Image: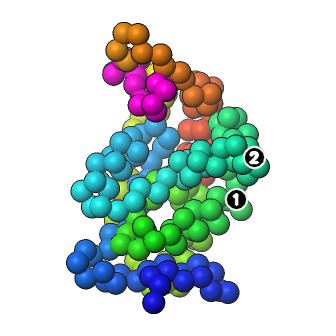
Amino acid sequence: ASPLEHNAAGLTLQKRGAHACMPAMRMILVGPPGAGKGTQAARLVDTSRIPHVSSGDIFRALKGTELGNKLDDYMKEGGLVPDEITIPIVLDRLTQPDCAKGFMLDGFPRTRPQAEALDKALANADVNLDVVLLIEVADGLIVERITGRRSDASGRIYHTKFDPPPPGVAVTQRGDDTEEKVTNRLRKYHSET
């Protein structure tokens, strides 16, 4: 039988214990943008051998598609992608085979409707979360971290103050890493999360 099934009632996630050699681990990282969720996720998923499911990464992977262009418009303005778009995209990602042994969610859920949709999907699949980890960082430090973030052509991330690129390496700043847009994202995070 397939570890994951789609049915008329919605999405079905694999139940715990389906792979005896490695117990499932289902985690959520919660925290404001720029708190270091992605950095910590990379360390934790390496240890746990589960996929890092980042809503932001999913959205950026859709770049160039009609949906991706719409998502990009929200993100360029520093806004959150609406729940009616985010929820089905992320829940569908959790039904992929690599999530059968567990997953680490990063950037989802951010709102009450997202949390309720995730809770319902997990309950329908008789799946429980193992860990919810909250990362708290002062807003001023987040602004400094995000506005100083740069990346090179390979995607490696640097920071103008904390981890500058080597001399001669060309770097760029993401369009939504400005102080105005970061402040807007933080305001939304605090009011909606």
Furthest-bottom residue in this view:
1
Q: Nearer the viewer, residue 85 or 66?
A: 66
Q: Tag 2: Cα neighbours inside 10 Å, few (<14), some, or many (≥20)?
A: some
Comes first in the chain, label 2 or label 1: 2
Q: Is residue 141 above or below residue 50?
A: above
Q: Label 1: few (<14), some or many (≥20) within 10 Å? A: few
Q: Does residue 119 sit above or below 35 in this rendering?
A: below
Q: Residue visible at 33% across and 22% down?
A: 163
Q: Is residue 160 left or right of residue 81?
A: left
Q: Which mark is residue 15?
A: none
Say what secondary structure mark 2 lies in.
Answer: helix
The reply to whether the C-beta atoms of the residues labelled 2 and 1 are less than 8 Å apart is yes
- Of the numbered discs in the image, which one, if any, rests on residue 85? 1
The residue lying toward the viewer, choosing from 44 and 110, is 44
Q: Secondary structure at mark 1?
A: helix
On the image, the x and y values in percent for residue 180 come to 63, 26
Picture disc at residue 70: 2
Magenta segment boundaries in residue numbering: 150-164
Residue 163 within the magenta-colored segment of the rendering: yes
Q: Amino acid at mark 2?
A: Lys
Vertically, is 51 above or below 39?
below
Give the prevailing secondary structure in the magenta stretch: loop
Whole-percent x, y for residue 162 in the image? 33, 21
